[in-house]
Amino acid sequence: MNKERKKLRVIHDEELEGLLSKLGLLDDIKSGKRKCKFCERVITLGNIHSLFPESGQVSVICDNPECVKKLLIYLQQKDL
């Protein structure tokens, strides 16, 4: 079985705030303005799981296992 490998970018917790700041998301996350793409739960620095590009924006998901599962399915469908 030939499976295509895709790159996965990861970031250490210590670097998360810097990345979020660069992306212009840190203030929104700290003030409770960003929500999970799948469940609408407010994203915090403690529950953020993933970021991914979508239509020129950055979407964010929480650490709820169901949302992580939905993300994997979504990315497979979008072929990101």
Image (cartoon, rainbow, N blue to C red):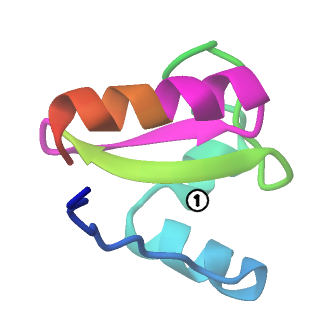
Q: Which residues are magenta?
A: 55-71
x and y percentages locating residue 11 in the rendered image: 59, 80
Q: Position of residue 65 (x, y in %)?
A: 76, 30
Residue 46 relative to residue 36: left or right: right
User: Is 37 covered by the magenta stretch?
Assistant: no
- In the picture, residue 6 is in which quadrant? bottom left
| Vertical relation: 54 (above or below) 66 | below
The answer, for residue 36, to whether it is visible in the render is no
Q: In front: 54, or 31?
A: 54
Q: Seen in the image, is 22 located left or right of residue 27?
A: left
| Viewer can see residue 3 | yes
In the image, is 80 to the left or to the right of 63? Answer: left
Q: Nearer the viewer, residue 33 or 59?
A: 59
Residue at horizontal 25 percent and vertical 59 percent from the top = 3
Using the image, determine if residue 38 lies above or below residue 20. above
Regarding mark 1 in the picture, which secondary structure is present there?
helix
The N terminus sits in image quarter = bottom left
Estimate the x, y position of residue 53 in percent, counting from the top left: 26, 49
Identify which residue is drawn at 31% across, 73% down. Answer: 7
Crowding near the residue tagged with mark 1, few <14, some 14–19, many ≥20 C-alpha atoms within 10 Å: many
Residue at which label 1 appears: 26
**Picture layout, residue 24 above or below residue 78:** below
Say if the magenta span includes residue 62. Answer: yes
Q: Residue at x 50, y 40 (%)?
A: 60
Q: Which residue in the rendered view is the most extreme toward the front? A: 1
Residue at the spot 71% in from the left edge and 33% down from the top edge: 32
From the top left corner, tell me how far across and down residue 40 is, in percent: 62, 14
Q: Amino acid at mark 1?
A: Leu
Q: Is residue 70 above or below residue 57?
A: above
